[in-house]
Image (cartoon, grey):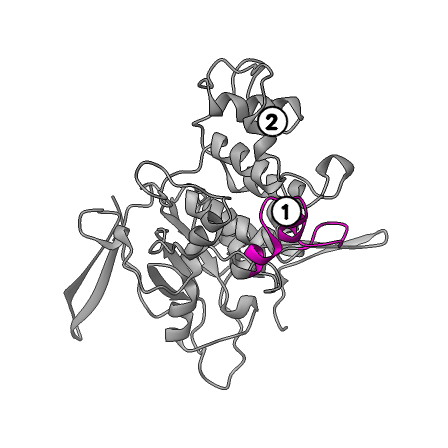
Amino acid sequence: MRTLALALTLALSLNISVPARAAVDETNTHRLNALGLFLGTGSGYDLGGSATRLHGIIMLTRMLGEEADALSFDGPCPFSDVAAGKPSAYTGYAFAQGYTTGVSTTTFRPNGALSFKHYVTFLLRALGYDDGAGDFTFAASLDKAVEIGMMTRASADCILQKQYALYRGDLVDLFVSALTTPLADGSATLAESLAKKGVFTWEEGRAQGLIGGGQESYVHSSLRNTGAPKPEQSASSGAVSRVTKTYALPSGSVSADVITVDTSAPGVSVRAAMVNQKLGASAPFSSIVSASGADVIVNANFFAAYSGQDKFPVGHVMADGTFLYGVSGLTSFGFTGSGAVYVGRPAVFFYVRGGRDSWACYEMNSKT
């Protein structure tokens, strides 16, 4: 365990975030189940279960309106690690159609984890976007989803920054968003195209709000204000703990909240964020907390955030590996990508080039 004793005399926002899935909302699951697009398991819908590569292939055939073709497929399945029956039919069909090549010529790894990027890539292809033709790239698939309104920017950012795992519940919610999103050629939404193919009727699609109800953008569960308790905050998890201690100083005793975070624990991430994603902005601390989605929030950088003075940071501001503000020579407090803590005075110089000339400056984005 690494202990972080943080003095609350600072102020931009520094988040120590322990992500957890919010309380399971089965609304979208019932909508898809009513249309035959999502079925349960032996233990119900299992929305909190991990999404697998086989799940992704099954959902892809449903997105394309080709599940009946997949289930009736009697060709060979080249993957030795796929069980006979429906799994073999789905993967054999997907291979024959060029939807997947497996992880090798003979293995598919059906129970391997399916990532957000892989699943969103499937959704974009189902909408008619062709990564082979340059419509988008796998690496930037979430950015493309944001561009077409299928996912919110905040959701894409938190998924990429915190490396969230994809759950079955995410499969459902993303599928609903894709169903209400227009196809690449603008001819219809995905739900309307499936209705035209006879996967379900137009009336059934309307009854579930997937036709004629407008586009629904995916929002990651960590950003939903459900009020549900986060299991990582319980005493049994041990990832985060808080205790109030009293310290004796020459001027008298002082109380301080000491937060202990195991930054190496699975799912724990630390990031710096700006109010309204803008330098010089401020907001009531309570609103910063409620909007953050993090379990622990610590003010940083400002010493006069709520006065009439200019609200520019003191010291460097760096978020997600990008310098946003820099004043060399002042003490900085930060975390590495692996969670290690550093305090020091990094001297950072920025080089400006214009034509054939270049020069160094020791501040970036500062008012002076």
Which sits in the foreground, 173 or 350? Answer: 173
Q: Position of residue 178 (x, y in %)?
A: 59, 51
Magenta residues, as a range? 182-206
Q: Which mark is residue 94?
A: 2
Q: Secondary structure at mark 2?
A: helix
Query: Residue shown at 55%/40% (left/top)?
Result: 119
Which sits in the foreground, 213 or 346? Answer: 213
Does any portion of residue 328 appear in the rendered image? Answer: no
Q: Secondary structure at mark 1?
A: helix
Mark 1: amino acid:
Leu
Q: Position of residue 289 (x, y in %)?
A: 38, 68
Magenta-colored stretch includes residue 358:
no
Which sits in the foreground, 191 or 95? Answer: 191
Q: Which mark is residue 194?
A: 1
Nearest to N terminus: mark 2 or mark 1:
2
Which quadrant holds residue 361? Answer: bottom right
Furthest residue toward bottom: 308
